[in-house]
Every structure is written in structure tokens, then in C-alpha cells.
Image (spheres, rainbow, N blue to C red):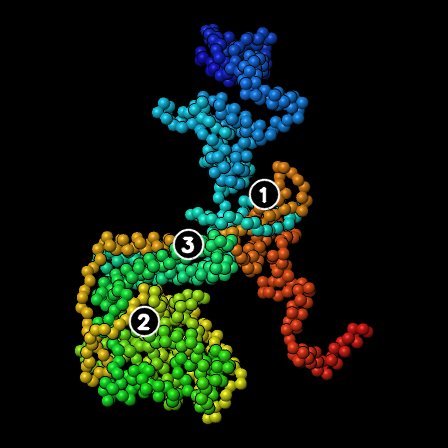
Amino acid sequence: MEQPKETSTGAAKKRKSKACLWLNRPKKKSKIENAIVTPLQSKDANERPKSIELRKAPLKTRGNRRKIRRKLYNAHADDKINKEITEILPTVISKLRAANVLGDFCNFLKVIHNGKFPLTNIAFLLFLDVVRWYSLDNTSSMEYSEDCLKFWKVMYRLFHGKALRFMTGMKSEYGGNNRRGEYSPENSSINFAVPSHKRVATYESVGVSLPSEMKPGIINEALELKSETKSYVLSFDGKKLAPGLTNEWGDQDLFGHEEKETLSQLRERLQNDLNIIELAKVECQRVPGKTEDKIEQLERAVKVVSVRIKDLRMLFLKQQMALNKFMKEGGKDWKKSKYVYAISSVQAQMFLIRNVVKKLLDSNSSLLLLGSLINGTSQLFSENQSIDIFSQRNMFSLKEVEDIPEGLLNELRFIKQRSPQWFDARKQLKLTGSTIFGGLGLDSLKLQRRHFDKVVKNIEIAEVISEDTAKRMEHGTVSEIHAIATLTTKVLPLYYPNLAYIEEGAHVINSNGTPLILVSPDGSLGKMNMDGIDIPTPVVACEFKCPSPSDFRTPVHYDMPIRYIPQVLSEMASMNVEELIYLCWTDESSTVFRVHFDTDTWKLITEEAQNVYLKETPKCPTRLSAESKVIKERLHIFRENNCEFICEVASCKGERIGCSYLVDGSPYVYPICNTEERNNLTVDEMDSIFSSINTCINEAYQICRKKATEVIVWILADTDRIFNPDVPYAIPIAYAMKGYSLGTKPMREMHEDVLRMCHEKKINVVASCFDGQWAKLSTRDKNDKPLTIMQLQRDVYSEASKLTRDAIVKKLLSESILPAEQIFSITEKTEEGLK
């Protein structure tokens, strides 16, 4: 007979699970050897069973008999606590009396007894955490209450890690007598039981996961907390901040709505600049490597450094203007005025800017030297502050008029500028390269009429030149040789290694066979044969400007002035070249632009010149022509699209102190060549150069960072405004960091961005609230059109108050009179409407 399978009932399982709580498990009952045999259930109980199944007898019910078991947790734990309190209370009272706080402790017990003390008070809960701290054997096992964690989270949000460190006090320190991770509270001297910085930073007290750091912008996590069924009011206002910068924080940040470069763009640009420098370093150290690739990367690196110099100079100009203002307000004895700290701060900032600019210029000089070594033109490069131009192999000047070969005397190109023959040629034409701007009315009608009277009517006009103007003109004439020296020693060895500078005389531009404009370029770039007398063909035109120092503009040009664009276009047209080098020279540095010719703009200029000066009977203009206005607009477009800033380099001064030689039959003076070659730079020297450049670029970025002085916060509040300590009716949903000033346009864009996000989240914003500083947001649209009748009335009154009486009468007569047909039509429609 088969043995029966053992089965267990639910009661047995329950009793088995409870056994894990017993201190002494009961002994198991021995198994029954003889199983009880029971008949199988069948339909007919009287029938004899065909088979018999053997199984164990069911568990026997114990009835009401209860066995005493020892459990882990005593049901009478309160009795034990009461007993402990009774035992330790005399000692506690004695120690409290000794500390002179027994009365306060008694009051504490009374207010708890009377129900006056809230047991959820945060100070009480923090006290309990301190008690829990000192009751542990190892503080590493400390667990903090949920309410206390919320408190420390708020403290961390408001005051950051410094507050946590201050409130903590001295925790246990690891020493030689204890193992790592085991700290006794007896060795600590805490003020509060404060969780670790990491524990607080990662703790989330609500169901929404809030990031530990929230950058300026819209807080999407906060929008998720708002209900879609309520109506809300969106308010924003600004609060002052203490300006300061860290590695990541403190910058002005309008979350992408800045009028110029955004903060993210500035940081991205910094990283791109450093990447360009790294690429140039890798390419220059590659052996072997293509010369074209190395030069391309070096040119990009030089431009990166030059743009950083530009940023610093623009900042220096603002600091200079601020310093002048503070000095004026402070007076002669400014060191005792209230502006002394502001003046000292600005002066320190200006000192830093000058220092970094000098280091960046030195960095560019190192890059230019490296480029000349790669191009094999190192004998042309010079790091000296002055050179003898007669020793420059890539510089060719014109002979004096009396030394020019007779066959070339009729060629104005070989007539030296400012010679008598050159002045005579200028008088015979109506326009020159430098007078196109004023002669076509691109400056003012007054200057155009004055020029017309002088060249067409031959009216002698006594030009009154001030002393300052005369000095600036003299400075430009004297400094032209320095610009040539800078071009030949700094720029050409890297950018145009196969071309030389060639002095130019004058060129005539004809219109239908009639001379129209006389142009006198400052020079050209072309290929020159040292051994022959061939006349070189210009490849690139050159124009130099040497502005005088001023407190109200940067020392060098970072954008080509509009008034010089017609001049450079005429120079390119006269020499039939597509490119021009524009160099602006000062004592400290020089900026270089590459200008590309534009046929359409030049065509507009020549057509206007023909209409004004080449008619059979020219008439003096009485008003500026429509064409002149179109030309002026095109000049701005030309500057944006055709003028490329390529570099800023340390300036060099030129002197004529050496020897040169003349070649019969040639109009040029040939230099005595300097054949001194330089040694190539080592890898360590190149590493030092590029490392210094990276440091300077980072310093320039840090100096140009804009500190935020105010925070603008957007608050979303429901219209019920019912106070609930657990659910606040208003929460911040966005913030921005602004500087000392902020225009209406970026403010409008930020507010509309926040409103758009609320709409996407289906949050019903019924009103926006802000102070009078941003009143234009409610009275004008983004196109500055009035939104209210009041604003429209004010605009009309403001416009009308500026008009004269005659202008008002003329406006009324021209706009208030309707044709008879229109009046009849209006009358008929009115009558039909009345019927």
C-alpha cells in the first residue's frame, strides 16, 4: 500500500510564520508512526469502499489552553519606560538644577501637560534629533526625522552649504583610535544634528523631483504643481543682489532673451575658441604636415585672439567713460569723496584690461612668427618696435619725380603723392577718392553744395581748419610710414607671403571716356622682381588710416567707418582688383580688414556721380537725392557683408635710416635685403605659446563677464488666495538675472515666454501684475504701437506739439478735405442707413 502524501493546513502555516518571533521555539511533536486509516468519501456511505487512502490525522485543537511564550517585544513596554523615568528623574533634576535650567524644564513639562505646546514645533523636533544623536553608539547609523529633513532642505535652498556647516558645529573626526565608519557621539560637539551636504542636496520633500541647481529660466517642475482647474495671476518684480561671480554663477542671464550674445552663447564661444587654439597647436606640431592647413589654423587662432582684444577694448572704453564721470562728480579732491571706492574699482579694472591686452598682443606676435617660419618668410618678420624700411625685402617705394624715367612721367601711377604734379592732377577732376562721400551728399546737403561750388563753379572757399583738425591731419600723414612698416613686418609674412608692398601714385576713373574720379591709393600688393624692371600688376589694394587718440572711441577701428567705403571701392575699381587691405594704425596696435569689391554698390556710386557732375549744365543740388539715400543704405550692407576683420597686431614704426639702391628704367626704390633666417621653434616652445594663449583667453573671458545686480522673479498665485500652510497659494515659476539696466524689448520677450509656457501647461492666467517700470508692456505692443486710447492720444499730442503752425494748417488742409464724389458717396450711404 502506498504511503499518503503529507499535507499542511493554513493554521499550520500561520503558526509556523509566528514562530520566527519566539525567543525559544517550542519543541516539535514527534511524528505518528501509525497512520489513521479513514474510509474515502463516496456517493453511498453504506457501500464498502473499494480503496483506502492513508493520511495523517488533522491537528488537534488546543481549546482555550494558552501557553506562555517569551516574545521580543514586551506588551508592557510603557511600564518599563515609566520605571526608567522614575529611576533617572532624581539625577536629571539634580543636573538641571546645577545648570540653572530646572525651572524652564518644569515649565516645558507643564505646557505639554496642559496641551499648550505644539509637539510638531520644529525647534522641538530638532532637539529630539540632537537627543537621538547622543543616544547612539555610532553616529553613522543616525536617522533623521522627515520634518527635520524638510527644514534642512529649506535652509540649504535659502543659504546653501555655508548655513549647514555653521549650524552643525564640530562632528566626530576620524582618528587612530577608531575604525572608519565608527564614530562615537561623545567625541562630537554639535549644535544641531544636521545631515550631510549630500543627504540634504538629494532629499526631495515632495513628489516632484526638483534639481539641486536651477539655472535662470522657466521652472517646469514648479508648473507641474499647479492645478489646471483654477485661475491664476502672474506677477513679476526685481530684487537687488550683491554682485559677485563664481565659476558658474553670478552672470547676467535672461534665459536667451539678451539683446546681444546670450550667456550660453558666450560660454559656447569660449569653448570654441579654446578648441581652435588646440587645433592650431596640434596642426603646427604635426610632422610632416601641409603648409596650407597649418596656415589656415594659425589664421583662425590669430582672429580668435584679436576678437578677445576687441572685447577688452570695448569694455575699457566703457570703464574710461565711467571713470571720467566719477572723477567729475568727485572733484579735484576725489580721494575724500563718496566716489573713492567706485573710482578705485574702475581703475583696478582698467589696469587688468591693459595687462591682458598686452599679453594677447604678445601672443599674436608669437603666432605670426610661427606662421612666418612655416611660410619661409621669417626674415621679413620683426618683433622690434621700429625697423628700417629699406631693409624690408617686401617693400618698394616710388622714386622722386625728378628721378623717374622720362617714359613714365605721363603715368600718374608713378607720380609720388603730395608732389606738385600730383596736386595739379587732383584739381582737374570733380571728385577724388576722399571727396566722394561728401560730394555725393552722403554726409550732408551743406557739404555737397559746398563741394559743388568749389569744383563746378570754381568759387574759392576759404577752408577754416581748426588747430585740432590740423594736428590730426598731420598725425595721419606722418604715421603712414609706420602703417607700411606694420603691414610688411607683421601681416604680409603670414597672410601674403608671396606678395610685396608697392607704393602707388594716382589712378583716373573714366566714365564714357570722360575723366570722373582721381583716386590715390596708399599702395598695392603685387609680385615684384628684384632683378628686373618689369612694372608689377596690382593684386590687392591698400588703404591706411591713423586716427588720433580719443576718450570717446576705441583707439583702433573695429568696424570700417562708412565714410571710407566709397574711397576703398574707388581704389579697387581704379586698379581693377577684387580685394583691399584696410589697416588702422596706432602706437600700440593695428587692426587689419580684408575688403571685397561689390559691383552693384560701385555702379550706384558712379551713376550718381555722373548725374551730379557730368551733365552738360550741372545744377547745384537743392535737396538730397533719393539715390544718395539708397547708396547710404547700401554702404551699411556692404560693411556687414564685404568687410572682414582678420587680426589685431602689435604696431611697428618705420624709419628711413639705411641704404637703398636705384635701378635704371624702374620707377621704384629697391631695398637692401635682409637675409637673416630664424631657427624653427621647438615643440616645448610651441607648447608654451599655446598654453599662454589659453590662459589669456580665459582671463579675457573672466574680465568681460557681466555681473548680475538684480534678480527678476515670476510668481504664479491663484485668485482664491486662501492660506494653507501645506499648499502655498503662490510659487515662483521663473527667474532671470539682470544688470543695472534692462530694456523693454527683452523684458517683454521673457514675460511672453513665461505666459506661453503657462498656456502649454493649460494654466489659466487671467492677469499679469508688474510695477510702473514696465508700464510700456501694457500700453504698447512689440512694434511700439499704442494698445490703449490714452496712449494713442498722448502720441498724437506729442507729435502735434512738435509741428509749427504752418505745418499744422497744411496737414489739416491736405488730410481733412475729401473729393466731392467721395463726399456724395458718404452722404448717400448715410441716408440709406437712416432709412
Q: Rate crowding at label 2 as few (under 14), some (14 to 19) or many (20 or more) other CA atoms within 10 Å.
A: many
Q: Is residue 494 visible?
A: no
Along the viewing direction, whichever of 75 and 704 lies nearer the viewer:
704
Quarter that holds the N terminus? top left
Disc 2 marks a residue whose amino acid type is Ala
Q: Which of 758 and 697 is in front in this view?
A: 697
Disc on the earlier residue, 1 or 3: 1
- Camera-side residue: 693 or 45? 693
Residue bearing mark 2: 483
Q: Which amino acid does label 1 sit on?
A: Leu
Instruction: Compare marks 1 and 2 and give the one earlier in the sequence.
Output: 1
Is residue 113 placed above or below 508 in the rendered structure?
A: above
Work out whether 811 lies above or below 158.
Answer: below
Q: Earlier in the sequence, mark 3 or mark 2?
A: 3
Q: Distance between the residues labelled 3 and 2?
A: 32 Å
Write down the residue under mark 3. Answer: 348
Q: Where is residue 117 in the image (x, y as percent from the top left)?
A: 64, 26
| Side (left or right) of 665 relative to 487 | left
**Left/right of residue 720 with respect to residue 262 in the rendered view:** right
